[in-house]
Image (cartoon, rainbow, N blue to C red):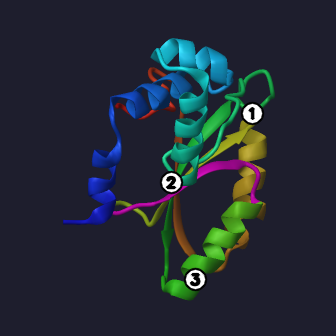
Amino acid sequence: MNSEINKVHDLDDVDIKILRALQENCRLTTKELALKIHLSTTPTFERQRRLEREGYIQKYVAILNADHLERGFQVMCNVTMRQINREIADQFKNAVEDWNEVTECYNVSGEGDYMLKVCVSSMHQYQQFVLNKLGGFPYIGHIKSIFIMDTLKLSYGLPL
């Protein structure tokens, strides 16, 4: 069986409690986290660092309000390539990393090759993104835009 799949079995109940608590609030101090999981601070600190070292915790982020920052016009953009190979995929990945309008990008199966989440201020700004950035990538065959009208559920955590 795949060792990555079995990796979760290396976690005990305390590790899971730490991960759950940090998903809810990553700004908890070690002391606050220790109180929440009913463990002293030193072992809590050591466990949290181990979870970081082993890659269970990738990074800590602040979740920003897109509307307050004039990035509330959000679009899911399906991109289908005319041609695809490793070199083109790497070029596209590098391009997407440079486009600050793109907040998420997934290589998908089914309809399209990539799914991008684009956050901009307006339809006009999205049009400029499509014309100047996506349209400038030579291997794109088709773009399908899906405009987000309302967010019904947004969860950044994983079920544990």
Percent x, y of residue 18: 48, 28
Counting residues from the start of the chain, the first of labels 3 and 2 encountered is 2
How far apart marks 2 and 1 lie (CA) works out to: 34 Å
Q: Residue 85, can we see it? A: yes
Residue at screen point 77% across, 42% down = 124
Residue range corresponding to the magenta coloring: 99-110
Q: Which residue is mark 3?
A: 88
Asked whether 61 or 136 is in front, the reply is 61
Residue 109 occupies which quadrant of the picture?
A: bottom left
Mark-to-mark CA distance, 3 and 2: 32 Å
**Does 117 sit above or below residue 91?**
above
- Left or right of 85? Residue 31 is right
The residue to which callout 2 is attached is: 54
Marks 3/1: CA–CA distance: 29 Å
x and y percentages locating residue 62 in the rendered image = 70, 30
**72 w.r.t. 56: above or below:** above
